Amino acid sequence: MAFSKQNRSNTLSGILFVALFAMSATYLAQFEIFHQFAISPLIIGIVLGIFYANTLRHKLPVEWQAGVLFSTKMILRAGIVFYGFRLTFQNIAEVGIAGLIVSTCIVSLTFVIGYFVGTKLLKLDRDTTILISAGSSICGAAAVLATEPVLKAESYKTSIAVATVVVFGTIAMFLYPFLYKSGLLGLNEQAMGIYLGGTLHEVAHVVGAGNAINESVANTAVIVKMLRVMLLAPFLVILSLWLKDKVTASTDTGVNTNNNNPKSNITIPWFALGFIAMVGFNSLNLLPQNFVSTINSLDTFALTMAMTALGMETRAEKFKGIGLKPIYLASILFVWLLFGGYFLTRFAVN
């Protein structure tokens, strides 16, 4: 056991080691260049972790590994639960039916398209396909992180999915304001906000692109994006039940449809329910705003620790044989979000 009497000290040392990397990522994220590209501490953390995994990892005491694994699992789940303090149920009312339609359609259609293209056309493995599709459809790296424990996917697949979110989300962050200012989109400010919030990958990308246009667009975009984030919890529950049904069906027919061992013990993720509970509590406005801001800052640090730890579990040899298929899938989803999201927005606001 990680926290047994004989292992407790080493596990805590491993957690502290990850925390030091996360502190470095948090510090680096304050640099102006990272602000300009809307690169969050989470992304910097996983890059630092990957760099460490492929250079100095052999210098880490083996006994500390339990602390790293604890960060990828329990700290990750706790971070997703407290991510709910960024949302309230009142956000739904603020964006109206148009924002709700766009958010729901984008999340469901993007995931379905991604799963079909990834597994059927590109013949990509199931876990990588689901992680990339979740990151594109919901809220970027946070969605990838939340989906990983449901799948029990390998760390390097999580890193691949996060990388696609960073690349294509950053491209979109610069492309969308350019298209709006060029007049090619023909959207008013409210519709543009819905379009941004409904299709961009990361919350940071939405903030960056929205503010590149104006404050009104940015405010609408963030609210719609938060609505997509709110759909993370039901998505995880549905995904968990769906995966369990697939395992049951494959066992009944004697066929294992997954590349890994059957995961018959998949259950509804408790952290998804915790996420909803935190959203509900935050909707009551019982805590002062400065206290909620502190919780969100601590939560960002926890998620940065989780990302850093995942990076530490990502070694170059695991990427052999992956090829360009993840990039192809992420590219297809990027094009779908750009054009499909546009037409969905036009339909919803008219």
Image (spheres, rainbow, N blue to C red):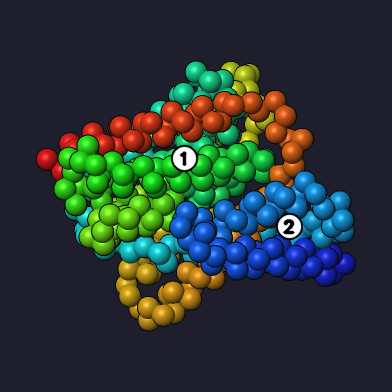
Label 1: state its secondary structure.
Answer: helix
Spot occupied by residue 98 in the image (x, y as percentages of width and height): 20, 46
305 above or below 240?
below
Q: Badge 1 is on which residue?
A: 168
Label 2: state its secondary structure.
Answer: helix
259 above or below 138?
above
Mark 1 belongs to which amino acid?
Phe
Q: Nearer the viewer, residue 158 or 92?
A: 158
Give the residue at x 73% y 68%. 16
Quadrant containing the C terminus is top left
Q: Quadrant of residue 293?
A: bottom left
106 above or below 53?
above
Q: Nearer the viewer, residue 321 or 283?
A: 321
Give the residue at x 58% y 34%. 127
Q: Badge 2 is on which residue?
A: 68
Q: Is residue 138 in sight in this rendering?
A: no
Q: Viewed as shown, does residue 80 lie left or right of 346?
A: right
Q: Select label 1 or label 2 by which is in front.
A: 1
- Of the image marks 1 and 2, the number of the one nearer the N terminus: 2
Quadrant containing the N terminus is bottom right
Residue 302 is tagged as none
Spot occupied by residue 170 in the image (x, y as percentages of width and height): 45, 46
Mark 2 belongs to which amino acid?
Val
Q: CA distance from mark 1 to mark 2?
A: 29 Å
Q: Viewed as shown, does residue 109 lie left or right of 123?
A: left
Give the residue at x 29% y 37%. 341
Give the residue at x 38% y 69%. 281
